[in-house]
Amino acid sequence: MPKVGKDHKQSRKIQILQAAAECFSDQGFHQTSMRDICNKAELSAGAVYNYFEGKDDIIESMAEVSRNSVKDLFQDIRETDSRRQVIDKILHKLLEVAVYQNKNNQLNMNIHLWSEALRSEKIKSILMESSRNMNSSIHDRLKNSSTKGNPSKLSDKQVISLILMAYQGLILQMALADSVNEKESFETLSTLLTNQTT
């Protein structure tokens, strides 16, 4: 029997996670069965269970994917950028992520994960680590930015709090409402934050 390569295993795992994400987004975690996930992935139960022990294992893997995606989110922000440029690039990157997730039915998944974190300490721990990673990544970019002689009226901590509150609030609005102008929302926040950086 031929060995299954790492690339094949990884692509199969992604296939299952994507199928599960569609099911969870449409039906929620508790209404979705493993049979639903198998059918959506077009795989046998044995094939799916070869990668995941069950639904909780799939949910935890999704939370880990969310956590790991934060690590390289702001890699294109340079140390030579001014504080205003850094804030603007961070906001645009988060907007890009939110729009992409909305188009790919992932926003509902994020909300389901937040809800599931109230039940599962493991998922809560993973999501809290993801939040800390994003907080730290934004802080590093702000700390290394150039103020060009113009100190900010807001501390890094205040800027980060406003950015993350706005981002999480926007995710909820985009998932629940049909008429959210996400670009306008972020432009408003950008104006507010950059006006405090003069």
Image (spheres, rainbow, N blue to C red):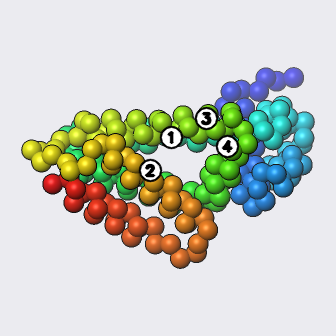
Which residue is tagged 2? 164
Query: Mark 4 and mark 1: span between their CA atoms?
Result: 13 Å
Which residue is tagged 1? 131
Amino acid type, residue under disc 2 in the picture: Leu
Amino acid type, residue under disc 4 in the picture: Ala
Label whose residue precedes the other's in the sequence (2 or 1): 1
Q: Position of residue 184 (x, y in %)?
A: 39, 70
Q: Residues within 10 Å of mark 3 (few under 14, many from 20)?
A: many
Q: In this view of the protein, can residue 11 be seen by the observer?
A: no
Front residue (pair 37, 195)? 195
Amino acid type, residue under disc 1 in the picture: Ser
Q: Residue at x 75, y 61 (%)?
A: 26
Which structural element holds mark 1?
helix
Label whose residue precedes the other's in the sequence (1 or 3): 3
Which residue is tagged 3? 126
Total of numbered circles in the picture?
A: 4
Checking the image for residue 117, the label placed there is 4
Q: Residue at x 15, y 54 (%)?
A: 198
